Amino acid sequence: MRSSTAPPVEDLTRPVAPTPSADPGSVQKVRRRRRHPPMLVAAAIVVAAIALIPLGFILGYTISIGPSTAAQLIFRPRIGELLWNTTRLTVGAMTLSIVLGVSAAWLVERSNLPFRRTLHILLAAPLAIPAFVNSYAWISVLPGANGYSGALLVVTLSYYPLVYLPAVAALRGLDPALEETAAALGLSRWRTFLRVVVPQLRPAVFGGCLLVGLHLLAEFGALQMVQFPTFTTAIYDQYQSTFNGPAANMIAGVLVLCGLLLVLGELRLRGRARYARVGRGSARPAVRARLGRLRIPSTLYVFAIVAVGVGVPVGSLIYWLSVGASTHVDTSLLITTTMTSVGYAAAAAAVAVVFATPVAWLCVRHPGKLSTVLERSTYFGNALPGIVVALALVTITIRVAPAVYQSALVVIIAYIILFLPRAMVNMRSALGQAPPVLDDVAHSLGLSRLGTFRRVTLPLIAPGIGAGAALVFLAAVTELTATLLLAPIGTRTLATQFWSFSDSIAYGAAAPYAAVMILISAPATFLLTRHARSGLIE
């Protein structure tokens, strides 16, 4: 008698290897797809080279001062203290972001939690509040929120949406048939979550954690306000207070190594499995779990996250706008800074999406060592403080292209270097969910490559493009340190003007600029929540 043996649950999420009896024509198509198109590679190399400008600047500076001087500047107690502070803050914030982001995502997406749509928007709302505005709010209402605890509180509440949104999108995109199959094989609900759902959430959660970690390595304004020294604040002090360029560059070099470890760690943990659904039909929505007695505590838990993440900064701004004794709004200056910030951010978002396209396409459609190296090269700029990127561009433009020194072009290039990973993560995710077989079908029907991209691929990845552009816009419209050094003389943005007032403890005068930054960022944040609900954002 022939026995039927069910496959183990672990095999449900693994990629299916091609069988030896596969059609030779299909194998040739796969091989052609894996070849690296020369024009695509050239475009990706140009993008990676631009992204690596600050890293090249640091390496060149290190070589110029010699290994002995570099060792004296690196191996000293101050570096150890900064490394400890940066590491514990990054690990703590990433851990708390996973806890808050994944738990809230599951409750909103997979349970019968009340007010889910409203809570989904409010949980993503901290993205519209710059981290240094969040620090300003907490310090103004709770002056004792300093040191490690204050820094951990502020950065976690500012960056947990970077994990929450990808987790929501991944949960919505999961095929519930896999969980039902696991349950039919005898697994409990909890073991099904751990053995079927968690492995499929891994790319989204680790991608979000990578963004959280890279943001923390580059964060300056929020940590300076809560007086918690890290590499970024030390670099700023070295440049602005003591004008010690070699010491600051060596600190930046250590910071680059930290960013490299983060990128390699995420690459290692993410694995090489693919999760695109290629079967017939489409996945149906999952059945929401009934919380029962846990419904009220779960609702209070989510509302508590919203209260501390959105309620405190918004309430603080309203207070300073209404009763701040030093409030005096220069309307013309407010309008000018607003137009400048929006113009810079919109240009940076558009160029970042264009730059991310060839690298992401190469990484997803032509995977290999070259593609991985080029993709990872674009992430280094996000791990660098804005002041390091700014000083690298200042040095290079003065020596190579003095005509563009202190121009809007240099400001936009700095934004691209700093925020390109935001566009990359979303573009890669969108391309990963667009089955390549559709391109082959379009080609077999007579469509050219350009026609296939325009009529087949572009509609599929459009939500990812919009999400990436929105994330870049959100970051660029509130960028502070690079803008301070690179903006043309006399040019002010909302962030630089806010920093100028808040640095002199004029909280009332700074409040209108913070409020405008939040109002500008709000539509982009709402756009992100819409894309997350469609399951096409990472």
Image (cartoon, rainbow, N blue to C red):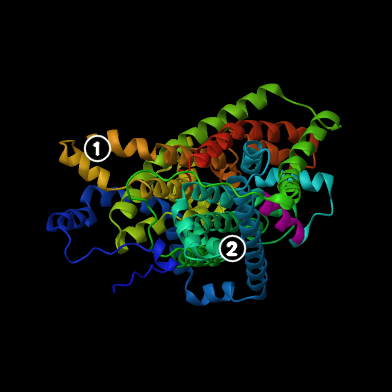
What residue is shown with label 1? 452
Give percent across and percent down for residue 126: 65, 43
> Quick one: 201 or 10, which is closer to the camera?
10
On the rendered structure, is 419 left or right of 363?
A: right
The x, y position of residue 441, in whole percent, is 21, 42
Chain part drawn in magenta: 149-157
Looking at the rendered structure, the kind of residue marked 2 is: Trp
Could you tell me which residue is drawn at 46 percent across and 55 percent down?
379
N-terminal label among 2 and 1: 2
Taking the view exactly as shown, the residue that stands out farthest to the front is 1
Q: Nearer the viewer, residue 245 or 425?
A: 425
Q: Of helix, strand and loop, which one carries label 1?
A: helix
- Looking at numbered disc 1 in the image, what kind of residue is underneath it? Thr
What is the spatial separation of the Cα atoms under label 2 and label 1, in whole angstroms? Answer: 43 Å
Measuring from the top left, give residue 209's x and y in whole percent: 55, 58
Quarter of the N terminus within the rendering: bottom left
Question: Is residue 504 shown above or below 324?
Answer: below
| Magenta stretch encompasses residue 155 | yes
Q: Quadrant of residue 313?
A: top right
